[in-house]
Image (cartoon, grey):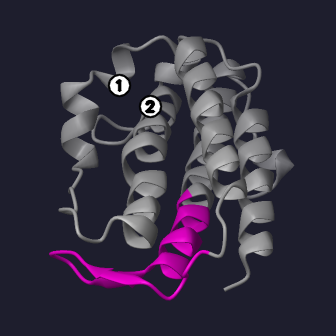
Amino acid sequence: MEFHRFYQELQCSTEMIRALLAGVEPEAARLKPEPASWSMLEVVCHLVDTEREDFREHLDFILHRRHETWHEIDTEVLAVERNYNGQDFAEMQATFFAEREKSFAWLSGLRDPQWENTTTTKYRTISAGEMFACWVAHDNLHLRQLVKLRRLRLEHMTKPYHLDYAGKW
């Protein structure tokens, strides 16, 4: 388990998320490629919830609280219950970055973590090291999604122009 490399990757992905959200107008943050997909705003709200209630929480559980009961989260249900696309875009960005800073402080404070500790959920057995790696991978998944959503925003901004000269998307 290469803690420092994963930590650095999480720092880098945080800055990439920040850059991908920069300059996006609140109305554009609500754009969806199709009704069943997520907007930029919904992605940010999801990142807030997973930062608070999933990765940091579950990693702490595996490292320090395996005697407690693992809690499941249903991200699709949260998106509806918490009205993700109705939230304030600037406020949700600020909340995400504040939560991420809490995560960095928590991660930096870990002393001799037992990365091989495991827990078994209703889906599978997962180690603390694997949970940390999944946290980084989760950021990457949403970075890809945010890039696609920025492209959608650009297509809306540039109508009636065609963007094919830029290269195949």
* Residue 164 against residue 136 in the figure, above or below: above
Q: Which residues are magenta?
A: 113-138
Given residues 36 and 10, the one toward you in this image is 10
* The magenta stretch spans residue 134: yes
* Residue 111 against residue 72 in the figure, above or below: below
Which residue lies at the image location 51% right of the left edge and 33% below the top edge? 44
Three-letter residue code for mark 2:
Cys
Q: Classify the position of the C terminus by image quarter.
A: bottom right
Three-letter residue code for mark 1:
Tyr
Spatial CA distance of label 2 from label 1 is 6 Å
Given residues 20 and 109, the one toward you in this image is 109
**Does residue 151 appear in this view?**
no
Q: Which mark is residue 159?
A: none
| Residue at far right of view | 166
Q: Is residue 66 left or right of residue 150?
A: left
Q: Is residue 46 left or right of residue 159?
A: left
The secondary structure type at the circle numbered 2 is helix
Q: Is residue 39 left or right of residue 99?
A: left
* Residue 3 against residue 104 in the figure, above or below: below
The residue wearing badge 1 is: 84
The secondary structure type at the circle numbered 1 is helix
Task: Give how far across and how far down residue 1 sits, in percent.
Answer: 66, 86
Which residue lies at the image location 76% right of the left edge and 25% below the top edge? 22
Question: Residue 95 occupies which quadrant of the picture?
Answer: top right
The residue wearing badge 2 is: 45
